[in-house]
Image: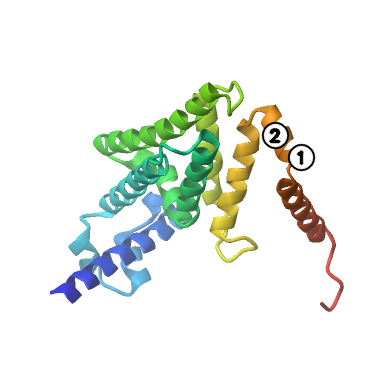
Amino acid sequence: MANTKIKNEALRSSILEAASNLFIEKGLAGTKIQDIAGALGITRTNVYYYYKNKEDILEKLTLDVTNLAKEVTTAAIGAKDQDPPAMLRSLVIMYSSFVLKQPILFRVSERNEQNLKAKDRSKVTRARRSVLDNFRAVIERGVVSGHFRGIDPGVTAFSIIGICNWSAWWFRPGGKYKAQEVAEQIADLVAHAVEQPDRQLRARNNGREIVKRIRGELEYLENLIPERPGR
């Protein structure tokens, strides 16, 4: 019985993954259930056993990814003993890592939200609002405490989320950087963007930060140097 359940869940996940790739390649309108079945080497009946139609698949994909995003960001701000910079860093790393590890799902949900039923769009909107509220709460706390500049929390939250979400479109697994490394770079960028100028100055004069910055600049310069022929 347990093995059957595992197999069913595995096939259900495989259908979602195949559908995601096809929705990106052909769009929802251009994708047929037969295309999804063919990509997996199964019959249309197998697909229909789990999902009524392709709209049902899209609903599952979109609701799953937005609800998980809500859970990830809520968990990230759960450690109330962290100061705002540490909390924002954890939040950005956890959220952007979540995006980077499943970029196709994010692209599908962003591109096809208008194809959802009204009630499902409302559920997605509520989940995304929770993500925004989590970011805004951390930024507001940092502004009040003096850790962050006098920035508008709403505009800043939208901007940070946009940076994280956009990575789903340009990140390629197996490239120069791993997902976690990219997430940490995004977090560094965000931290420097919101910090108070005097805190940035102290950080620039910190020995560890100086070494870290030099290493980053050396890596950048090495990438500018063309490889010799034959190497």
Residue named by callout 2: 200
The local secondary structure at tag 2 comes to helix
Q: Position of residue 162 (x, y in %)?
A: 53, 38
- Give the answer, above or below, for where 154 lies relative to 41: above
Q: Position of residue 122 (x, y in %)?
A: 29, 33
Foreground: disc 2 or disc 1: 1
Is disc 1 surrounded by few (<14), some (14 to 19) or many (20+) residues within 10 Å? few
Q: Dividing the image into 4 quarters, which one contains the C terminus?
A: bottom right
- Give the answer, above or below, for where 56 lies relative to 204: below
Residue named by callout 1: 205
Q: Is residue 84 left or right of residue 67?
A: right
Q: Is residue 44 left or right of residue 100?
A: left
Is disc 2 surrounded by few (<14), some (14 to 19) or many (20+) residues within 10 Å? some
Q: Amino acid at mark 2?
A: Gln
Q: Position of residue 34 (x, y in %)?
A: 31, 65
Please report the residue visible at 62 percent of the width from the left and 49 percent of the height from the top.
185
Q: CA distance from mark 2 to mark 1?
A: 9 Å
The local secondary structure at tag 1 comes to loop
Mark drawn on residue 25: none
In-front residue for pair 95/100: 95
